[in-house]
Image (cartoon, rainbow, N blue to C red):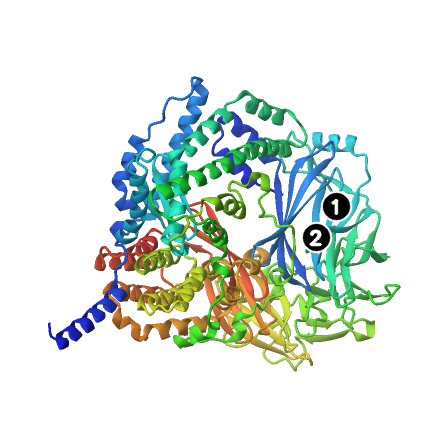
Amino acid sequence: MTRVFCPLLLILIATATQAQTKVFKEVGEDIATEVKAITQDNTLVGYLAFTRLEKTDIDSFNYRVTIMDENLNDIGTVNFRQRNLELMSVSFEQDVLCLGYLEAAMAGVLTGKEARQAYRHANMQNQILLQFISLSGKIINRFTSPVTLSSTPVTGTGSAWTYHMASYLKNGMQIKNLAGKGFCVFYGDEDKKEILILDTAGKLIRRKKVTVDYPYYFLQTSGTDIYLLTKMHITPAEGGYQLHSYSAADSTLKEFVLDLKDKQGNWLKVLSFDNDPSSNKTFVGGCIINPDREKDFTTAHDLSRAPYLGVFSMTLGTNKNDVKTTYSYWSNENIPGVNKDGLFAGDNEFYARYQTVFRDFSGTTVFVGSALVEKRLLGAAKYKFADAVFVTQDAKGKLILDTHLPCDETSYFGPAGQLDQMDHKDFYKVVNQDTHTNFIIVDDATNIYIYNFNNRKLMRTISHKDGRTIIKVFPAKEGHILVSEYNGKEKQTRFSIEAL
Amino acid sequence: MTRASLLLFCILSGLLHTAYGQTTSLYSYQDLSHLYYQAQKDSLKKVWACPDVFKERDTQKKLRELWDQRTENITDAIIHDDYVHDQDVYNYIIGIVRQIAAANPQLVSFSDLVLLDRSPSVNAYTIGGHVLAVNLGLIVFSRTREELALAIAHEMSHDILRHYENGMQERAAWLTSDEYKQSLKDVLSSRYDRLTKLHHILENYTFSRSRHQRYHETEADSLAIILLKKSNISFDSRYFLHLDSADGDYLQHLQQPLKTYFAAYQLPYEDSWTIRRSHGLSTRTYNFSDTSHIEDSVKTHPDCVQRCEQTRRWNSANPQSTPIPAAVREKASKMLIWNLYTSGTLTPCLYRILLEKDKGVKDPWYDFMVSNIFYGLYYADRQLNRFNAIGIIQKEYISRDYYALQNLLDQMPRDNLRQSCETFGKEAFWTSLQNPERNLKELLKFMALNTDVLNQKQLAKAAHDYSADNSGSMYCEFADNLSKK
């Protein structure tokens, strides 16, 4: 949580004496605010500021939730008193906000003393709390379910003499809206993992135990279909994905499970787990892991030795039979210009380090990544990361190198260069549902590139640094980006929500 | 004089009058407060010496702090050009002040410092010490001289009754009182509800202060009516009701559909741009209890309906309604529009121009400002700052037309915005404008339509060149802002 002073205190500090300032400062230090995006159907519809105002007794606090629209304008506040809360997830459906908290005296990172105090005074069980707030500012309902916390000592906080302990929900909590129905909540603690379906009145409709215990869970919904992507710790480290599908329309939450492997049994590496903007169906996209090279995927040399056999995209459906997967193998002769190692041949040969996958409004799957260029000097290989590359896959699996987008090039590095350290490109997807446009933001070392995929046009190039101003961009409401400009001279940050 | 020469004289006078109406220059750069009031600013620091009021050292020290803070606030406002001196508008305002002062010599015996505040909010204020400020927003909003005089007399009354000075003394006494210090200690010594306790301390003080202040407002109303009566300025209690509607500037509707205004400039326009294309919360119907609502207990001013009722019996028998001279109102309005533009809030700036157009203004200066707005918006877009330049206001606080305009400025595609700038560059009205305006167009064109993204040095040089070529023009303020960035 970021600690902030409330405006009331700031005003008063201006007129207060030093002794009085101490009071305002101390009271202000207890105030902490956290901002989260409010989403519906994977689209940002607003923002929420969750503020812990003050301690009200041995284990309770006064809280304030400030709800903002997608333009960061306040639309209302809700005040309430509760035990120690950690806000974990937020979603929105049919004019109701669903906020998911962990309610536990020990939640968060505490010093040994704080943890002992919290433990001594904790007279209630730990639980998850779901709060349902209407757009008239009323808490219309709440739902709780007991949980068992995980605890671990934390190193690197405070001095070497201060013991810190983190208590948390083992697999966290994720909330997604179910269009026209309510909310789907996934959470996992030490003892269990559950999926809960609640309507917008906050009434529990169904709950389903998730029977597998894996380290990672990712929730996605499409209409009334619910998908839980899990990942286990196995070799290959990039594989081990399993898909669990449920239907909220079915009274028993009938489930089908799918190991993410190709027909030859090769594990699939997931890069994106998202919804198709035109059909709203959930899809999974990524790479097919080469079983012969499954341990070698971290260096430039590894990438040039075919750690992947190809790429895949999988469209999900309510039933197992509805799942359609398209595979594209480098070895397939139908893929022109790509050799068996995944090298794109031509004047500018490169290997693609794929980082994300998106679907455009015509249903084409697009794999996006960085081009790793190899150069041989007296037999020794050198590498550099250069352009952003966009590779399209059609329904039959035919791959086409669609675009080379010149971005920031790195200098040449050796074969042992770690890919995740040398490749500075991050990719964000922005969709404009109204104009049916897909944008990709390439956040590179020096510049940010905004690319309109529909027009195959570079819309803007924004320098990260302009004099003493540091610029960062983040996805915002549909078709927009949130630009943060930190002015080092004035020590101020300006936010702007700009159309693409 | 023959009939023919009389006719010629009339035609010439008419033409001259029209030409004057179109070319009346607004204030010059030297009329901005950091230059015009430099001497007054320096003298305020010397003249405003804190009086010895309290025997207790702490309390006197606190009073001095508050006193100095007041001086700093006003001098900072002068430095930051919150005020402007326009001779015509100033003469009109000072005329009212002097009429009231002359008729009430036993009460008003000071030489006023009357400032024109550039703020669009409908307000006048005093900070004591015989300093009176009248916002341009009030001058534009007021319908008659009498209504404006009521607001001015009300503020003069605050000054006569030393409300501001007394307020500072009360505050100094409270902030150094044992009760206050003890209550703060209690906050620190308590483990729980610290913010609530602190809030209560401040709320109790604010409540008590607001009660006083409301009493002060009633007192100032009563004295203002006396001042007006003695000055032979009509009083009508309904003025309070009109002032109560002051927050609704952007709730006014336009007389024409939005596209008519755009068609007049041959600007690209699509109805779809005026409709918010978003699934965000701003488009939903929400009804949170109004968090901006001020509790009745902490309101500083009595309710205007109540004020109207309470003062009805003092209404003048046959109240006069002297319209504010069109030239004064127009100048105030133009200054207001320019100030909104320089402060980078383009939607309210454009909306005010459209409201002026509804009143039938033909002055090409307004066309020049519309052009500036589009250049400014396109430049802001290139600088990733269109969102802030538009200053999106929630639909609940604005009219349907304002909402449509705001959406249009937000959603008009970038290429159409550029096209608008290019269209403005070719408009005929430029020929009726003077060099400073035409040169500003060139500066804006350089900023907005340059194929390269300009760096700070290039901008500063262009701004410097503008200031050098148009020395003394009010538009140099815009160039100043560019250089300072």
Q: Mark 2 — residue?
A: A89
Q: Quadrant of residue B363?
A: bottom left
Q: Quadrant of residue B467?
A: bottom left
Q: Amino acid at mark 1?
A: Leu
x and y, in percent, of residue A477 in the image: 59, 62
**Contact (Cβ within 8 Å) of mark 2 with mark 1:** no
Q: Residue at position x 77%, y 56% from top?
A: A185
Check the image and name the residue furthest to the top: B55
- Could you tell whether B249 is left or right of B76 in the image? right
The image shows residue B191, relative to residue A290, as above or below, that is above
Q: Is residue B304 visible?
A: yes
Instruction: Determine whether the residue tagged by mark 1 lies in a helix, strand or loop.
Output: strand
User: Which amino acid type is marked by label 2?
Assistant: Ser
State the image coordinates of residue A416 (x, y, percent, origin top left).
58, 57
Question: Circle 2 — which element?
Answer: strand
Q: Which residue is mark 1?
A: A102
Pick whichever, A99 or B360, lies toward us.
B360
A78 and B260: which one is in front?
Answer: B260
Residue B261 in the image: above or below residue B293: below
Return the x and y of residue A338 as percentages of the image width and height.
Answer: 60, 76
- Taking the view exactly as shown, the residue that stands out farthest to the left is B1
Q: Nearer the viewer, residue B135 or B8?
A: B8
Image-based side of B83 in relation to B180, left or right? left
